[in-house]
Image (cartoon, helix red, strand yellow):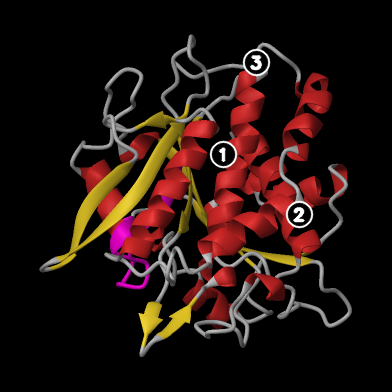
């Protein structure tokens, strides 16, 4: 049995605006600054800095009202002999009282390069921006649930580790799904792949340095619309207009069919794509700051970054 909302969506406008108002440019700037600061040490997998970042995500999940999976926020997996990664996973219940058997996964990788030859690689756009966006979405959806909104799907939020190690974190999550170890914390039921209707990955979402059109820096790229049902493929553009976001939307990678195919399979949505799960990637593209020591918070465009989070929120809400 699926959750069904007893309310028309348009009666939640005030509550939705209240939830969105929780996420400000200053708050995002502060969060990305923390994730890129010396305490997190560049967030390389298996380091103390990675542990600090994972704890920060766990705290944000708890504050948003998410449930732990198997009584733990973090889930360890092997990267290579002697090196372990930790995914951070939490679930927002679509409803506490009406049974649901549908799940959407929203993820972003939190690892980066760490310290190399004594130099720290902060990874603001790659991918502190994605992590702060993902936890912001958790906070916004969590606020709506606290105000009584019922969703037609549970939402699983995941901060992936070890993206820089051949996507080992998302592979580890898929192994949990495939072997029945990812379970609904409310009823203990296994979350099988047939119950997952969508995977949303957020990877590098804070820059305005690689615009799709030279005239517009307020852009966003979404790859993977072909994996969606036909009646959902134009939903992002509709949200962009109807919800007043007004961004320059691109559904391919800079107009190239070949690059679109390549980049669609380069991040943590890949294992879901390989297993025929509808999956999309939200990104603002690769810039000259990628994997550089100067990929810092001051190079992000907070106003556009904030609007992108709004648009993702509206789109995901309509996909539930």
Give the image location of residue 45, x and y in percent: 31, 66
Magenta region includes residue 162: yes
Q: Callout 2: helix, strand or loop? A: helix
Disc 3: which residue = 148
- Quarter placement of the N terminus: top left
Estimate the spatial distance between the alpha carbons at disc 3 and disc 1, rounded to whole Å. 15 Å
Disc 2: which residue = 25
Magenta region includes residue 114: no
Does 298 sit above or below residue 66? below
Does 20 sit above or below residue 258? above
Give the image location of residue 18, x and y in percent: 78, 30
- Quarter placement of the C terminus: top right
Residue 85 appears in which quarter of the rendering?
bottom left
- In this image, 132 relative to 71: left or right? right
Residue at image coords 36%, 19%: 186
Q: Callout 1: helix, strand or loop? A: helix
- Mark 1 against mark 2, which lies toward the viewer? 2
Does 260 sit above or below residue 63? below
Local crowd size for mark 1, using a 10 Å CA cut-off: few (<14), some (14–19), many (≥20): many
Residue 270 appears in which quarter of the rendering?
bottom left
Estimate the spatial distance between the alpha carbons at disc 1 and disc 2, rounded to whole Å. 17 Å
Disc 1: which residue = 138
Magenta residues?
156-170
Which one is earlier in the sequence, the residue at label 3 or at label 1? Answer: 1
Local crowd size for mark 2, using a 10 Å CA cut-off: few (<14), some (14–19), many (≥20): some
Which one is earlier in the sequence, the residue at label 2 or at label 3? Answer: 2
Residue at image coords 82%, 27%: 13
Residue at image coords 68%, 79%: 255
Local crowd size for mark 3, using a 10 Å CA cut-off: few (<14), some (14–19), many (≥20): few
């Amino acid at each position: 049995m699926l959750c069904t909302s007893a309310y028309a969506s348009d009666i939640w406008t005030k509550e939705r605006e209240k939830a969105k108002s929780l996420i400000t440019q200053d708050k995002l700037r502060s969060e990305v600054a923390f994730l890129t600061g010396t305490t997190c040490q560049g967030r390389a997998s298996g380091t103390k800095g990675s542990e600090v970042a994972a704890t920060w995500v766990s705290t944000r999940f708890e504050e948003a009202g998410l449930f732990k999976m198997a009584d733990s926020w973090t889930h360890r997996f092997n990267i290579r002999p002697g090196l372990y990664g930790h995914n951070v996973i939490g679930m927002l219940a679509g409803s506490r009282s009406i049974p649901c058997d549908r799940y959407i996964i929203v993820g972003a990788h939190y690892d980066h390069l760490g310290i190399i030859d004594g130099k720290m690689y902060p990874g603001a756009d790659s991918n502190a921006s994605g992590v702060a966006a993902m936890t912001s979405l958790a906070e916004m959806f969590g606020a709506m649930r606290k105000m009584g909104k019922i969703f037609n799907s549970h939402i699983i939020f995941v901060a992936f580790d070890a993206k820089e190690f051949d996507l080992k974190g998302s592979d580890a999550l898929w192994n949990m799904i495939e072997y029945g170890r990812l379970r609904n914390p409310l009823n203990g039921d296994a979350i099988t792949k047939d119950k997952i209707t969508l995977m949303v990955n957020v990877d590098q979402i804070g820059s305005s340095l690689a615009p799709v059109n030279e005239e517009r820096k307020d852009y966003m790229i979404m790859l993977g619309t072909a994996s969606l049902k036909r009646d959902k493929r134009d939903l992002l553009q509709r949200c962009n207009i109807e919800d007043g976001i007004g961004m320059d939307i691109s559904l391919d990678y800079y107009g190239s069919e070949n690059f679109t195919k390549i980049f669609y399979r380069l991040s943590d949505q890949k294992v879901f794509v390989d297993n025929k799960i509808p999956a999309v990637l939200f990104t603002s593209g690769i810039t000259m700051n990628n994997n550089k020591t100067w990929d810092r918070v001051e190079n992000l465009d907070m106003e556009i970054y904030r609007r992108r989070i709004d648009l993702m929120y509206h789109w995901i809400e309509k996909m539930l």
